[in-house]
Image (cartoon, rainbow, N blue to C red):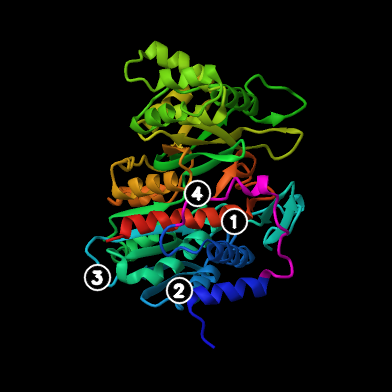
Amino acid sequence: MRLRPREYWAVGVVAALSVNAPAALPAQAVSTYRVTTTAPAGFDRALAQRASLEHLTKLIALNTQNPPGNEMLTARYFDAIFAQIPGVERHVLDAGNGRANFIARLRAVNPTKRPVLIMGHMDVVGADTTKWNTPAFTATLRDEEGVSYLYGRGAIDDKGMLATATAAMEQLATQRASLDRDIIFLATAAEEGGDEVGIDRVIEKHFDLIKDAEFALNEGGRVRVADGRVMSVNIQTTEKISYNVVATANGPGGHASVPLPQNALAALARAVSRVEEWKSPVKLNETTRLYFARLARIEPDPVMKAAMLRVSSPMASKLQIDAAAAILSREPLHNAVLRTGQSLTLMNGGIRSNVIPSEGTATFNVRVLPNDDVRAVVSAFNTVAKESQVTFVLTGEQRAPPPVSPVTAALYQAMEQAAMAMVPNTTVIPFMSTGATDGAALRARGIPTYGILPMPLPMVDELRMHGDNERVPVPALGWATEFLYRTLQLVTAK
């Protein structure tokens, strides 16, 4: 018997998960993710919960850690899923060596507007499996403190996004006749680094498949949970630009039995210590001013609240802004939003414990504000280091910052409306991501892109991304699917 998509997932989830299904959750634990407002037209909440869990369970089991990536495994999975949905065109884009991108386009019957694109990446960072409490590449359900969690690499970044987007599109596909624009689904390779076989390859070789998109929805933002409720929905409208800066120290080499005053590694250590502690000047932009202004609405600490209001005020002087920023910078996340930041990530030098090396290197990963100049930052590093033996050099070329995606666009407005419809007392905040995403490449090609990690997460879980024991609260998947469904329905409704 051939099942329709909705029936297929209702049966498939029961078959796959009935043995290990989590027990019913206490009302207090579930209330964080329970939407009490009326469901949108045509949306089945129970089905969305089951389908998103089913997809994510299977996606985690496909080992796509980068390197080597092996995204073809996931591309074929999506190809099989979208093949069951009428009105969908599919493209598995083979990039060689097991790498691949995937595009599916749900065709509206009578489109009158340009498409909306929704995307995520299929690769995940590696995992030190010796430090995990569960198998990193096997989805594992565990009940802890009244909440059911799904553990596995990619549960949050970014297979959770792909799973919930797929579940939302399955339900939207039943309303194809009422859509006024196509919906394009894009799953990319290599977002976590390495060979440029992901979004860059899609733009270079397959841009015709997506270039008509009016705007795009990607990862990058946050739905933040605190005190048992969704406190804010942070929508990424821009992001920092990632660069690597290498410090090289030179000095005389020799036998370790004769200490040398110009030891290269000692000079390197002093230089990188000074640069690591240095803070670049505060530089606000339209997004970060509005970010702090909105965040102040929900900040419980009166000192931090006052600092947010001051730093976001268009009437504040530089002296007042710097004073407020000094308070906000006590919190690492706020500090990263306020200024270009640098993190020491690699140090290399020496060949034997009894040999003084003549050279040593250190690498800083530098996340530059869209309105900052990386070459000026590198120049500042050389000044701050105060070591004549050490030189800081930018690797690669300086890139033009992509434009900021406007908050007036229909997609941003739909995301804001969807959030308020689900949680009327939440706060929607435009957000500058401190991390890099595929969205920057699309913005650079003229497609406004908005980021959201749609699963509501408390900070303790959000910080597990790229770390050990990555997990997602299971009921957050249904919430995320509804948010994406509402957003896409609003922006595609006739």
| Residue at numbered disc 1 | 154
In the image, which is nearer the foreground, mark 3 or mark 4?
Answer: 3
* Marks 1 and 4, the one that precedes in the sequence: 1
Residue occupying image coordinates x 66% and y 33%: 357
Vertical comparison of 117 with 87: above or below: above
Q: Secondary structure at mark 4?
A: loop
Nearer the camera: disc 2 or disc 3: 3
- Separation of residues labelled 3 and 4 (CA atoms): 31 Å
Q: Which residue is mark 4?
A: 453
Q: N-terminal of the two: label 2 or label 3?
A: 2
Q: Nearer the viewer, residue 367 or 222?
A: 222
Q: Which residues are magenta?
A: 17-39
Question: Secondary structure under badge 3?
Answer: loop
Judging depth in this view, the residue of 317 and 427 nearest the camera is 427
- Mark 1 crowdedness (10 Å alpha carbons): few <14, some 14-19, many ≥20: many
Circle 3 packing at 10 Å, graded few (<14), some (14-19), many (20+), is some
Q: Pointer 2: what residue? A: 82
Q: Is residue 241 left or right of residue 179?
A: right
Q: Which amino acid type is marked by label 1? A: Gly
Type of amino acid at the residue the image marks with label 4 = Leu
Under mark 2, the amino acid is Phe
User: Closer to the camera: disc 1 or disc 4?
Assistant: 4
Decide which of tag 2 and tag 4 comes sooner along the chain. Answer: 2
Q: Quadrant of residue 387?
A: top right
Q: Earlier in the sequence, mark 3 or mark 4?
A: 3
How crowded pointer 2 is (Cα within 10 Å; few <14, some 14-19, many 20+) is rated as many
Measuring 32% from the left and 43% from the top, which residue is drawn there? 405
The residue pinned by badge 3 equals 110
Select label 1 or label 3 by which is in front. Answer: 3
Rendered position, 351 above or below 89 = above
